[in-house]
Amino acid sequence: MFTLISCIGKNREIGRGKQLVFNIKEDMKWFRETTTGHPVVMGYNTWNSLPGKLKNRENLVVSYKDVPEADRTIKDLDEFIKCHKDIEEEIFIIGGGMIYTAFLPYAKRLFLTEVDATADDATVFFPKFDKSKYSRKVIKKGKDHDLTFTIVQYTKK
């Protein structure tokens, strides 16, 4: 089962170059707790933006060239999706924008930290999706400095 997890602004912004637009301590903790013990799939740019391999998770990187430091390189994304879309094991999709777009049609759940703010200089965005096709459950609300956020679970109906 594919689950997308991201922190997004009001305009679905998620990144600025190789950096996150919003760095919220509680969101980072939520991300770590939720994804630990599960495989995480990311694009090459997301991989390069990390300080290192994500601990206690199988790190899978979508790339046409080998990424030796990763646990696995996914060279054929369509084949990977085809082989894994109906399995019970939860696989977290952690970015970036093109990777989210590729997996969105197959995702059963989305965990989105929705930030009540915008970033005009964002360069990477979460894809648009039809919220009417999902049930919405608020997991947590919070505030980090001047940022108000809500962690939401969307489950495909």
Image: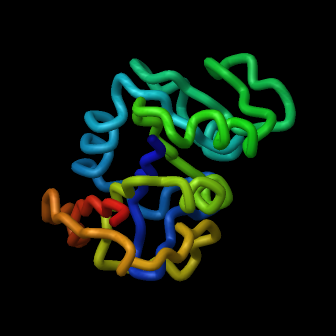
In the depicted structure, whether residue 71 falls above or below residue 75? above
Task: Name which residue lies at 41% across and 27% down.
Answer: 38
Q: Quadrant of the C terminus?
A: bottom left
Please indicate whether residue 136 sits to the left or right of residue 13 in the image: left
Q: Please tell me which residue lies in front, 88 or 69.
A: 88
Query: How far from the left and from the top, in percent, is residue 66?
Result: 81, 24
Query: How far from the left and from the top, in percent, is residue 101?
Result: 62, 62
Query: How far from the left and from the top, in percent, is residue 126?
Result: 53, 67
Q: Residue furthest right?
A: 65
Please indicate whether residue 35 sits to the left or right of residue 13 in the image: left
Task: Name which residue lies at 48% across and 28% down.
Answer: 39
Task: Name which residue lies at 26% across and 69% down.
Answer: 135
Task: Name which residue lies at 24% across and 69% down.
Answer: 136
Q: Quadrant of the N terminus?
A: top left
Please indicate whether residue 27 sits to the left or right of residue 50 in the image: left
Q: Quadrant of residue 133?
A: bottom left
In the depicted structure, whether residue 68 falls above or below residue 107? above
